[in-house]
Structure formats: C-alpha cells, structure tokens
Image: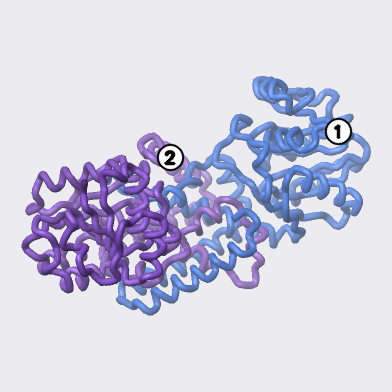
Chain colours: A blue, B purple
Amino acid sequence: MQKIAIVGLGVIGGSFAKAFKASDSSNYYVMGIDRNQATLDQALEAGVIAEGEVENETILQRADIVIIALYPENIKEFILQNSDAFKEGAILTETTGIKQYVIGSIVPILPKQVDFIFGHPMAGRESQGFEYSDHTAFIGANYILTPLASNKPENLEVFKALLKKIGFQRLTQVTPLVHDELIAYTSQLCHCIAAALINSDRPERNTVQFIGDSYRDLTRIAKLNENLWSELMLNNKDVLVQVISEFEAEMSKIKESLITDNKRELEEAFIEATRRRVDMEKNDLMI
Amino acid sequence: MQKIAIVGLGVIGGSFAKAFKASDSSNYYVMGIDRNQATLDQALEAGVIAEGEVENETILQRADIVIIALYPENIKEFILQNSDAFKEGAILTETTGIKQYVIGSIVPILPKQVDFIFGHPMAGRESQGFEYSDHTAFIGANYILTPLASNKPENLEVFKALLKKIGFQRLTQVTPLVHDELIAYTSQLCHCIAAALINSDRPERNTVQFIGDSYRDLTRIAKLNENLWSELMLNNKDVLVQVISEFEAEMSKIKESLITDNKRELEEAFIEATRRRVDMEKNDLMI
C-alpha cells in the first residue's frame, strides 16, 4: 500500500484525492494537508483522505509520495518549512503550469532525502476549490513530465504507473523550456485571448441575447483566478509574449484580407485552420 | 395543420425538419427542397419530411411557411427562379448570419404575394450537412428577428409561435445593423480568433500532447466552411474589422502588462474578464 500525501486540497489536489479513491482505493492510503480545516473536513467526510492536518505534524514523515498542489510561490515556502519532515527516499512532485521558473526556485532548496519529479497535469479547471474537484478530471488527459537528470529511474516508473492508474493516458517527457513554450501557446495564450475577447465587448450592447455556442466556448476560460494566472504568466513572460505576437500576426493577416477584400487569402486561412484542427482531432485522445 | 417547406436540408434546415417532427408533428406537414436527391432520401427515410423535390415542382405552391436555409448568394437565385410559385400570403424566412447585406439584396426582388421575415437562429454547428442536423439544436437557443416595417404583425406572431414550439427560448427583435454588429462580435470575431490561434502554431511543435481543455475549446470552431464564412465575413466586413480592432486593443493591453511586469494591470484585466463572464452566465439561458 502506497502512502500518499496531498498538499493543498484545491481543485487539482482534490481531484487527485478523488481519483485515488475512485481507482483502486485499497492500494492507496491518502492523507491531506490543507491550511483550511473546513476543506479537510469536507475531504474526510467524502472519504477521499484518511487523515488530515492543517500544518504537517506526522503526515510527511510517513508519506512515500507527496503531491504538492499549491501555487508556485507557496511550494518553496512549504518545502523550506518542512524540509526535515519528509521521509527518506520520498518521491515529491508539484502540479504547476510553469516549469523553468518553479524548477529554478525549488531545486536549490531541496532536502537531500527526497527525489523531486516535476510535472504538469493537463487538466485545469475554470473553477477553484475542493468543491470543484472531480474524480474523472484526469481520465484520458495528458501529463507532461520534466524530469531532472538526478531523478531515479525507478522512482519515475513508480510515479508514471501511479498517473496511469488514475486515468492519465499520455505521459510525455520534455525539457522545462519546451514545456513552457508549449504551455504558453496551448494554455496561457488561450486564457489571454478569452480575457481580451470578453473585455472588448461594449457595455451598451445587450450581448447576451446574441450569444451562440462559439462565444460560450471562447469565453468559458475567461473566469480567471487573477492571482494564480498573473503569477504563472509573469514567470513565463518571455515565451508568452512571443506566442502572443505570433497569434497577433495571424489575426492581422485575416484582418488585412478582409480590408482588401481578398477572398482567396481569407479562404486559404480557413482551409489551413480546418486542416490543422481535423489533424489535431485525429491525434487528440480526449476528443 | 401548417404546411412548411424547408429549402436546403443542411445542418440548419435539417435541424428545423427534425425539430418539427420532435415537437408536435401532427401540427406540421413538412416538405423539403434540396438539390441533392440523396439528402432528400435520408430525410424521407428519417421521417422528418413527408415529401421532397430537388427543384420546386409543387411544394412551394402549397407551403404556408417557407424556411430557406441556403447560403446568402443562393437565396436570391432561389427566389428569382421560383417567384411565381410561392403561395399567396406565404410567410418566407431565411437563416443566414448576416442581415444588412441579405435584406438589401433580397427585398428588391421579392414577389408581391409573400411576406418575408428575416431572422437568424443562434445555433450554428461546426459541421455541415444533414447528417449533423439535430432535433435538439434549437432547444434553449436565442433567435434574432430583424423584421421589415412591411411585415404583417399577425405573420410575425405566427412565426414567433412556431419558433417557440421547436425550442427557441429568447426571441429578440433588432435592426439589421445592430444584428450585424453583434454577430460580428459574438460569432465572426470568434471564428477569426480560432483560425488565427491554430494557424499561429509552429509545425515543428508536437502540440497535441500538450493540449488541455482550453485549447480544445478555443479551436473547436476552427473547422470553418471557407466558402460560407468568407462570404459572411466579407459581406459584413466594416463592422467585423471594427470589432477585430477592438479585440486587438485588449490583447495588446495584456501583452503590454506582461512586457512591463505590471502585475496589478494584468490582474485588473483578469478580474474584469471574470466579472463579465460571471455576469453573462447569470443571463445566458444555455449555460
């Protein structure tokens, strides 16, 4: 039986806890650390953690695997405060959406007795908090691992097997830079677009009566946790600004085709977009 | 019993036919005109039309209501070819996504014996063709009407009652200009954004392994029928270019906040976006 500690029972940490229970709960003894007692009580009541602590007292000392589902800034603090508590040989991981910055700030302060495997579950939710966590959140989803050269191969295998168990389907290993570039494009840029789209509405319009599915889809992620996202984006700003510029260039091409009445060029842009989307659907496990 | 002719059994026309059957089919006698015999056969087999013709022979002469679900360019041609066939007092309508241009091109050639009510069902689908039509497509959806001063009030009431019967929930009347501005924003801009986003991907990336829900959502409508959309957009280009520029200005604000490390400004943009989206959800019937 693996002893697992989940630190931070928000939407991601909570989904991990629920996914463990939903998969094969006899294999896992899941404990929770969350500064909010009410959240721990909820998780205990739901039966997804066996015990909980608002600050670590005895949990980390027993945990074989520690999943830290906190904001980037809070991970470092948590590790510093508990560096002596982690069990000898424990596997640690975190779930944030940026890797270069987080790895750079955490590796220098890591206690010697642990093996920290950095990674990113590709299953963000637009709502925060344990109440929005979901045992199916990870089923079929992608997981990106950015291992360190120092990670023990056997620990990587243990962690990957665990991820597969709770539903992740495609596990990919890349460098932190490649991760951050791709996340800037597939996630951060999308969130910027959603915010810019809804913010460009004119208040005097009665837009809601005109909404179709496309607008609903494109603004679903406009509900942004401003603290988390500005932190993630500012700590990844070089690559993010680059992908924003590349997007702006494509947008500007379309606008130019419209202004100059260039139907052929406009159609070419739409044919290419269609081709890419169809291609994506062939390879995307969750469509 | 109302005799209804549907012209063009694509995804929209087909959804009308299926919705009539699904609502209270004993009230409606539905006939179909489609240049494709195979489509007519499918619709006949599905029992959603009682009879079909590839070109009008006897259907329009009997139809009280004619729903023309064709591309903008084809509506005019259809009316010109059949102007003598329409029944005296028939209500005609079309379903295209632009109103100023369509009204401007059709009103001058309308036969005297019909009452043409222009409108737009807000329920586009990303796939084309009868096989993607759906009897639930209109349930809870918005319908925008842009009536002419010459429309008979009793005909408007008949048409509105029909729309309500098949599931449309909020019927709104606006001027063609207001319609086109709002459609430019809520639909055409969204489709341009989706195309620009997917076209700005770099081919050397293996993006599909990094996709999360946000990218899936924002590119769902990137599968564009290039003929239809370029026609709709070019015929609405003045207002579309304007809303693209307004969107670009918001995008550029976000980019600037990133470049200048202005966390407060970035957070403000996200707080405003969240407020707007939450507000929208309170008033959107389909969320």
Q: Are marks 2 and 1 in contact (CB under 8 Å)?
A: no
Residue lying at 75% horizontally and 60% vertically, measured from the top left: A175
Q: Quadrant of residue A5?
A: top right
Q: Which mark is residue A35?
A: none
Q: Is residue A106 left or right of residue B69?
A: right
In x, y percent, where is residue A15? 68, 37
Residue at mark 1: chain: A
Q: Nearer the viewer, residue B1 or B258?
A: B1
Q: Which residue is mark 1?
A: A3
Q: Nearer the viewer, residue A102 or B22?
A: B22
Crowding near the residue tagged with mark 2, few <14, some 14–19, many ≥20 C-alpha atoms within 10 Å: few
Q: Which residue type carries mark 2?
A: Ile
In x, y percent, where is residue B40? 36, 65
Q: Secondary structure at mark 1?
A: strand
Task: Please say if A12 is above or below A197.
Answer: above
Quadrant position of the C terminus of chain A in the picture? bottom right
Q: Which residue type carries mark 1?
A: Lys
Quadrant position of the N terminus of chain A in the picture? top right
Question: What whole-number distance in Å separates the C-alpha atoms at marks 2 and 1?
Answer: 40 Å
Q: Residue furthest right?
A: A88
In x, y percent, where is residue A183? 62, 56
Q: Secondary structure at mark 2?
A: loop
Residue lying at 75% horizontally and 51% vertically, measured from the top left: A104
Q: Is there any visible trace of residue B176 in the rendered image? A: no
In x, y percent, where is residue B167? 33, 42
Q: Quadrant of residue A113?
A: top right
Q: Which residue is mark 2?
A: B287
Q: Nearer the viewer, residue A161 or B54?
A: B54
Q: Is there any visible trace of residue B63 in the rendered image? A: yes
Residue lying at 58% horizontally and 62% vertically, measured from the top left: A281
